[in-house]
């Protein structure tokens, strides 16, 4: 995955890798690299069902979302203490900053941890400390989005929301992730209503493997402001028209779609068609430790496969700021910096 078969000009490579950008779709547990999984397993005396980093990596051959999630939850089982959550998050923020990410909205899955007896406080404190330190030392800003696991019940999601109430100041929003098929957004209407009443913004995974109907119900029943993935919208013209008209962004993750066999080849990916139809689409890494690369790798592979150009790169980066939950003033400032950066390169 690390080699790019088609060529990208040095100028486009420089623009993509160095331009300021926001990342809006990253599961922090999906940034746990195999080396760190083994280090934490040893530190916490947890026995893993793999005997080496190489054998764990060998298991990263997924056929669909569920086959990935089974391994992803096993990997997350090494996280026990606040320091573990800190180490994982700081490692991601270092990589993101090196990729030109100036702002990240980070998903986390508390139920994966609270179900194993880890407290909400342990999880959130570890994440927050890493975000604060990365802001100070690396100059990257980040916010947290707490996701509900859709394969669990709405009651469990409601308990999770209640457990997070003492930490509301650290959360920008709520999301919905995990096994999509068979768990439509409407299963979570009440908990999303409660979260919005607490002032949290709402996003949801929809249309990753699931049908366009799941995107409609995420919009109409959960009142989400963005759709995570949303690539199946390509099969529904009316939905595309609505996304474009209302500027409802899709946080797209091309290497994830490739690794989870949504597409056999990135050349089939609809991201450019969606952009050209007026949809605000962004490029993100989803679970970079599992899918072969962080945000710049996602850009580079996509640009090579679809033969995209500098104008597309700037459009995706602009969408990333527009679709973020930063203030309007900050959005304007980052878009202006992006334009200055592009002009300085003669783009
Ligand atoms: N959790 C982590 N990665 C995910 C994905 N790609 N889809 C749904 N849930 C997830
Ligand atoms: Zn995701």
Image (cartoon, rainbow, N blue to C red):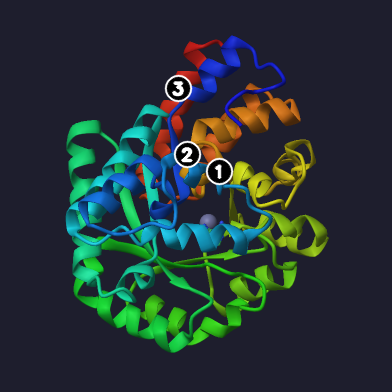
Callout in the foreground (3, 1): 1
Which one is in front, 324 or 59? Answer: 59
The numbered mark at residue 296 is: none
Residue at 64% in and 30% down: 301
Disc 2 marks which residue? 54
Q: Quadrant of the N terminus?
A: top right
Marks 2/3: CA–CA distance = 31 Å
Disc 1 marks which residue? 58
Q: Is 18 left or right of 93, judged from the image as shown?
A: right
Percent across and percent down for residue 206 are 62, 65
Q: Residues within 10 Å of mark 2 (few under 14, many from 20)?
A: few
The tag earlier along the polypeptide, 2 or 3, is 3
Marks 3/1: CA–CA distance = 31 Å
Q: Is residue 331 above or below residue 227?
A: above
- Indicate the secondary structure of the residue bearing disc 2: helix
| Contact check, label 2 and label 3, Cβ < 8 Å | no
- Indicate the secondary structure of the residue bearing disc 1: helix
Q: Is residue 106 above or below residue 335?
A: below
Which one is in front, 12 or 285? Answer: 285
| Contact check, label 1 and label 2, Cβ < 8 Å | yes
The tag earlier along the polypeptide, 3 or 1, is 3
Residue at 61% in and 60% down: 67
Q: Is residue 83 above or below residue 284?
A: below
Marks 1/2: CA–CA distance = 6 Å
Q: Is 258 left or right of 100, judged from the image as shown?
A: right
Say if disc 2 is inside 8 Å of ligand 1: no
Q: Residues within 10 Å of mark 3 (few under 14, many from 20)?
A: some
Residue at 42% in and 39% down: 332
The numbered mark at residue 18 is: 3
Asked whether the viewer can see residue 60, the reply is: yes
Percent across and percent down for residue 49 are 43, 57
Percent across and percent down for residue 176 are 50, 69
């Amino acid at each position: 995955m690390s080699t790019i078969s088609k060529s990208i000009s040095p100028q486009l490579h420089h623009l993509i890798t160095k331009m300021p950008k926001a990342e809006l779709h990253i599961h922090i547990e999906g940034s746990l690299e195999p080396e760190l999984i083994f280090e934490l397993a040893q530190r916490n005396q947890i026995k893993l069902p793999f005997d080496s980093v190489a054998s764990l990596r060998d298991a990263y051959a997924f056929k669909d979302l569920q086959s990935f999630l089974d391994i992803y939850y096993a990997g997350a089982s090494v996280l026990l203490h606040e320091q573990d959550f800190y180490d994982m998050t700081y490692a991601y923020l270092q990589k993101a900053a090196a990729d030109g990410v100036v702002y990240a909205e980070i998903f986390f899955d508390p139920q994966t941890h609270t179900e194993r007896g880890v407290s909400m406080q342990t999880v959130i404190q570890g994440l927050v400390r890493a975000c604060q330190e990365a802001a100070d030392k690396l100059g990257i800003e980040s916010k947290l989005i707490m996701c509900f696991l859709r394969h669990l019940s709405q009651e469990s999601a409601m308990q999770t929301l209640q457990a997070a109430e003492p930490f509301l100041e650290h959360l920008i929003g709520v999301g919905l992730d995990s096994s999509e098929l068979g768990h439509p957004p409407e299963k979570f209407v009440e908990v999303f209503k409660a979260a919005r009443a607490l002032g949290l913004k709402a996003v949801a995974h929809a249309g990753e493997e699931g049908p366009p109907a799941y995107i409609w119900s995420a919009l109409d029943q959960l009142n989400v402001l963005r759709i995570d993935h949303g690539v199946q919208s390509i099969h529904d013209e009316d939905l595309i028209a609505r996304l474009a008209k209302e500027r409802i962004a899709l946080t797209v993750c091309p290497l994830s779609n490739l690794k989870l066999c949504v597409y056999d080849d990135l050349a089939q990916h609809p991201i450019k068609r969606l952009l050209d139809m007026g949809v605000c689409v962004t490029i993100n890494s989803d679970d970079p430790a599992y899918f072969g690369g962080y945000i710049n790798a996602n850009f580079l592979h996509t640009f090579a496969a679809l033969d995209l150009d500098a104008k597309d790169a700037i459009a995706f980066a602009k969408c990333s700021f527009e679709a973020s939950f930063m203030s309007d003033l900050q959005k304007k400032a980052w878009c202006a910096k992006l334009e200055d950066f592009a002009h300085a390169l003669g783009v």
